[in-house]
Amino acid sequence: MDLLSILAVIFDPRIFTTILVCTFYGAFVGAMPGLTATMAVALLVPFTWFMEPVQAVAAIVATTTTAIFAGDISGALLKIPGTPASAAYVEDSYRLSQNGKPRTVLFTSLLASVSGGVIGVLILALATPQLANLSRGFSSDEAFWLATLGLSCAVFVGGPSVARNFASLFIGLAVATVGIDVAVGHPRYTFGVFELYDGVSFIPAMIGIFALSELLRNAALGRVTRLSGITVEPLKTAIAAAWGEFSSRWKNVLRSATGSTVIGALPGAGADVAAWIAYALSRRISKTPEKYGTGHMEGIVDGGAANNAAVAGAWTPALVFGIPGDSVTAIAIGVMMMKGLTPGPDIFTNDALLVYTLFGSFLLANILMLLSGGMSVSVASYLLRVPRAVLMPLILLLSLIGGYAITGSVLAVWIILVLGLVACAMLWADIPLAPAILGIVLGQVVEDNFMVSMMKAQGDLTQFFDRGAAAVLGAITLAVWVALLVRAARNVFENRAPPGNTEKQ
């Protein structure tokens, strides 16, 4: 694929405008407390229905890139992280803001995020074609183990409670079982509704699980914005101070961005996990660990770089194996399938232009984020004054209209409402949503490849370990299962231990 062809596509007025608009859209949604990057993408999905595949992927990439960073804005000003990825260092950023440095904090985070994003994209562009070449010889055995490994990793990194992670995964798998059985052609859980024979429509499910659940939770919490009492420094002073902080900690940026790209490539991990790990590692090796949590810039730089680097890393398993790296890429895979594209190693030959346009869109979105993110930081105090009583009903209306517009069926509205209520109940029970999403996306993949392999092997389960690559992937998957059992046993032991013993440990 020659560079001129890629540049011609990226700088096509339609694609360029889409990326530019979506960077501002992502900055707006990400800055709103409680509106996550995943929700921003879920709300965007209905509009991608009317876009070309390249334009739709570019829109998702640009939205995610800026929404992840913009989560820092409400975190620093209100102590309410706009995205979960910003929660790792929210205490530091908020305290610095209270000390009269809100713009310095946010511009430092912006520079770290842009640098982390660019590093992540470069690693993504270099690594994924090589991995795709390796995976071209995979059969249904390897595909089954990869999908199972993705589900297992989702449980492993989903949250501290293994039981809750499994509960979330099984809810997703239960949703994925709705429809026609692939082996015998018998309808399952369709209740006589013919529209369910093809399964639960993916896009309304995503809108319900992410958008509606967040709306209900925010309505129940009754959060209010409060910006009084914060001193805002002059713009030039803040930019100069931020550049000084960033340039003196470039090693932190390089380390966190590289490591977080790898973490983001793990199915189910994503930017949320990467930011926490980068912050914890930064504190562990810092010369001043006692300053973390009291308003220290070092953790903000590490966490900010990790956020956007992990966003790029999450696309690695999605492009190479067709396995979502996080909830955003799970939605992106759904959009690509909706457009007739099948993520996997063959996409590098069948739709090479789309893949390399995705890399270019990532790079351009990160660069444009300097503009959109900088403007968002400059007007943040006005941005966060949008009345929630106006914003939330508008988002609900767009969600329902978007779901209906895609399928042209009232069933989509019911799917949004039912799964939104289920997801809201999961949030109140402290059950993470990400494993459920992977269950919906990968459930059909696991079942299809399992049945194909079983029919080829005539029921002999040992054939899943007959091929070398399948044996390695199977061994890794089983090792993850053992680790999960050990972690679950430890959770049970800690919960049963008397309070006095727990404190001594």
Image (cartoon, rainbow, N blue to C red):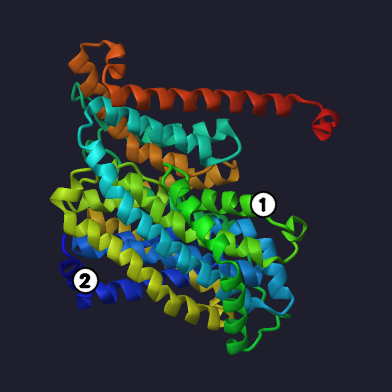
Q: Earlier in the sequence, mark 2 or mark 1?
A: 2
The residue at 36%/69% (across/down) is 365
- Looking at the picture, how far across and down is residue 179, in whole percent? 26, 33
Residue 285 is tagged as: 1
The residue at 17%/72% (across/down) is 8
Residue 2 is tagged as: none
- Looking at the picture, how far across and down is residue 56, in whole percent? 26, 62
* Residue 362 picture quarter: bottom left
- Looking at the picture, how far across and down is residue 368, in whole percent? 38, 75
Amino acid on which the number 2 mark rests in the picture: Leu
Q: Give 27 or 8, whichever is nearer the viewer.
A: 8
Q: Give 462 or 47, whichever is nearer the viewer.
A: 462
Amino acid on which the number 1 mark rests in the picture: Ile
Q: Give 149 or 122, whichever is nearer the viewer.
A: 122
The residue at 25%/38% (across/down) is 134
Please, which residue is most extreme toward the left here? Answer: 350
Horizontal side of 459 relative to 81 (left or right) equals: left
Measure the alpha-carbon separation of dots 2 and 1. 41 Å
The answer to whether residue 72 is seen in the rendering is yes
The answer to whether residue 34 is seen in the rendering is no
- Looking at the picture, how far across and down is residue 166, in whole percent? 50, 31
Of labels 2 and 1, the one closer to you: 1
Would you name the residue on which mark 2 appears? 7
Decide: is 335 above or below 174: below
